[in-house]
Amino acid sequence: MLARLETMVLMGMEIPLEAIQRQIASALEIIVHLGRLPDKSRKVLEISEVLDYADGQILLKTLYRFREEGRDHEKILGRLVKENSLTQCEKLLVAGY
C-alpha cells in the first residue's frame, strides 16, 4: 500500500529507502486506501493505522476493510467492516476527535 508513496519520494530525492520509510511511519497515523473496483466505481477499500517502523518495514494494522456484499445491475455493493480498534489515539484526542 505504501510502495507508491515510497517510489514518488525516491524519484524526487536521493534518500535511503529506510529513511523514507521511517519518515512515513512517523508522519502518518491513519491511511485511507481508495481503489477502483471492476465496475469502475471508486470506494474506500481499507483504513489502516500506522503503528511503527521495524525490521525494514512500516507496520500497519487494518482497522476497516471493504467487504463486497453483492451486485445490483453490475454495480458492486458492499460496506466497510471493522477488523480492529484504533490503538494509538492520543493525537486524535488532543485534536478534539
Image (cartoon, grey):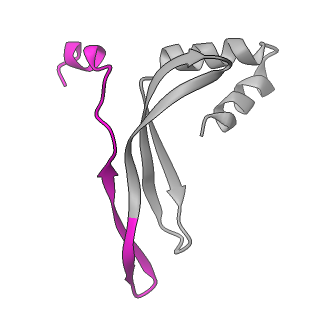
Residue 31 left/right relative to 94: right
Residue 63 vs 34, above or below: the answer is above
Residue 76 vs 94, above or below: the answer is below
* Extreme residue toward the front, this view: 55
Image point 52% across, 75% down: which residue? 39
In this picture, is 19 found above or below 60? above
Q: Give the tally of numbered discs.
A: 0
Report if residue 1 lies within the magenta region. no
Q: Position of residue 2 (x, y in %)?
A: 61, 34
**71 over 47 or under it: above or below:** below
Q: Is residue 22 left or right of residue 31?
A: right
Q: Is residue 71 left or right of residue 81?
A: right
The quadrant of the rendering that contains the C terminus is: top left
Q: Position of residue 63 (x, y in %)?
A: 36, 39
In the drawing, does residue 82 fall left or right of residue 2?
Answer: left
Pick whichever, 61 or 20, lies toward us: 61
Q: Quadrant of the N terminus?
A: top right
Residue at image x 75%, y 18%? 17
Image x and y of residue 78, in percent: 35, 67
Magenta-drawn segment = 68-97
Q: Name the residue at 53% across, 66% down.
A: 37
Q: Spot the residue most to the bottom.
A: 73
Q: Residue at x 57, y 20 (%)?
A: 24
